[in-house]
Image (cartoon, grey):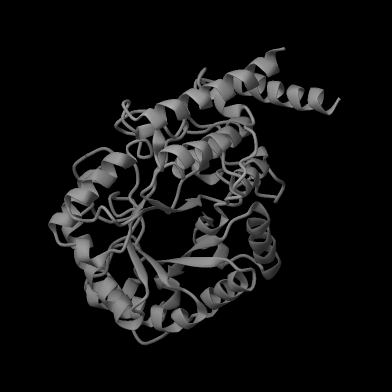
Amino acid sequence: MAATRTKGAVLAFVVAAAFSGPQWSASDAEAVVSRPSAPSGRTVASTTGFAQGHTILWVSDDQLARDLDGMVRAGAGWLRLDFDWPSIQSGGRDRWNWGPTDRVVAAAAARGLSILAVPAYTPDWARPAGTNGHHPPTDPADYARFVAAAAERYAPRGVHHWEIWNEPNLDDFWQPAPDPVAYTELLVAASAAIHGVDRTATVMNGGLAPASDIFGDALAPRTFLMMMYAAGAGPAIDAVAMHPYSFPYAPMLRADWNAFSTLPETHALMARFGDGRKPIWATESGFGTGSDEHSVNETVQALRIRQLVDAWYEFDFTGNLFLYTYRDLSATSSMAFERMGLVRADGSSKPAFRVFQQAVEQPAFEREVQRGLCGPAAHLAPAGNDHCVETRRVARFVRSRVLAALGS
């Protein structure tokens, strides 16, 4: 009877997803099938987390506790947290208000969550008149002074990872237009300031968003990264941060615009500049359940999250993976970006919550077999590698038997 219920649940998942719109493809059917448990007990909790944005700084104590407790229940080990320069130094160059940041850092530490700090954006006194906070500071030294003070305050509290700014390859976050040279100047100054306080710190660039090269509006991630390297960013970074969104499509869909499936090309670019040993961190990724053209329904979100986690840990050059967000930012918005949580705005769980738990607790058996016999990123191994050919044959056999059982 239990086997019948399991079979019915899987079939219901497949049927529901099949009617979800153009995001579903035949190859996704195999990804839905539950694989046998891996024997190694390997987990990925220590390198997964959530990016909730600046909003978590301003929620009530009760809401903060519910959000952080939920992240822990989901299996995450990290929180990506905005260190909001405009509010910390709203009163001027020599005035500091660390209270909201102290509160969240302490609450996260109490639950065993590590922090990835994102110092951003710019207070009004540090930028040109008539601009908003997404304009970079007039003097990078002001930003460097801020991050040095933050590192000095929070390194003793366990904060050693820093992401400098957010999506500087978009004009939404670097105004009036993306400027890799100016950004690199800010990055180099910030990295020196942080490492001057905390020699063990890990500093990375602001996560680069998927984009095409559109003069004045955006630069593609690899274009921006190449220009950063040309401007001297290499020695300033210990990792490269990306935002490898692929919504609404599957992460490994091969397309030049897909920032996830082209991660090997990004890593190859890093290697060309001598940074092949540094990891790529995904400091934002995920899938939204709104109703716009970028959205998926909740069933497909669950599928995509599993695909995302499994694919991420197949690569041998990746570091941490952060989902944006834990909780929806809105209960009613049609926009994918405001409905990307694993739980809804009221805290109730979407199907993706349990799927993420399972992915973190137990990575896919097929990936474990490939890693054991072929090494990391086995799906990229040369066709002539006999061990990997055999691994793929075994994996296909296991898949076919499970699919046959479902159809019996």
**Residue furthest bottom in the image:** 94
Q: Is residue 165 left or right of residue 30?
A: left
Residue 57, percent across and down?
A: 55, 67
Above-or-below relation of 380 to 72 = above
**Residue furthest left in the image:** 230
Whether residue 303 is visible to the viewer of this picture, yes or no, is yes
Closest to the observer, 358 or 379: 379
Residue 362, percent across and down?
A: 61, 45
Q: Quadrant of the N terminus?
A: top right
Closest to the observer, 196 or 291: 196
Number of numbered labels in the structure image: 0
Residue 54, percent across and down?
A: 50, 62
Q: Residue at x 63, y 54 (%)?
A: 75
Q: In this view, does 240 lie to the left or right of 404?
A: left
**Residue furthest right in the image:** 1
Q: In this view, does 401 lie to the left or right of 286?
A: right
Q: In which quarter of the image is residue 88?
A: bottom left
Q: Which residue is drawn at 42% across and 41% down?
A: 245
Residue 314, percent across and down?
A: 44, 41
Q: Quadrant of the C terminus?
A: top right
Whether residue 224 is visible to the viewer of this picture, yes or no, is no
Closest to the observer, 346 or 260: 260
Closest to the observer, 390 or 378: 390
Q: Which residue is drawn at 28% across and 72% down?
A: 190
**Residue furthest top in the image:** 408
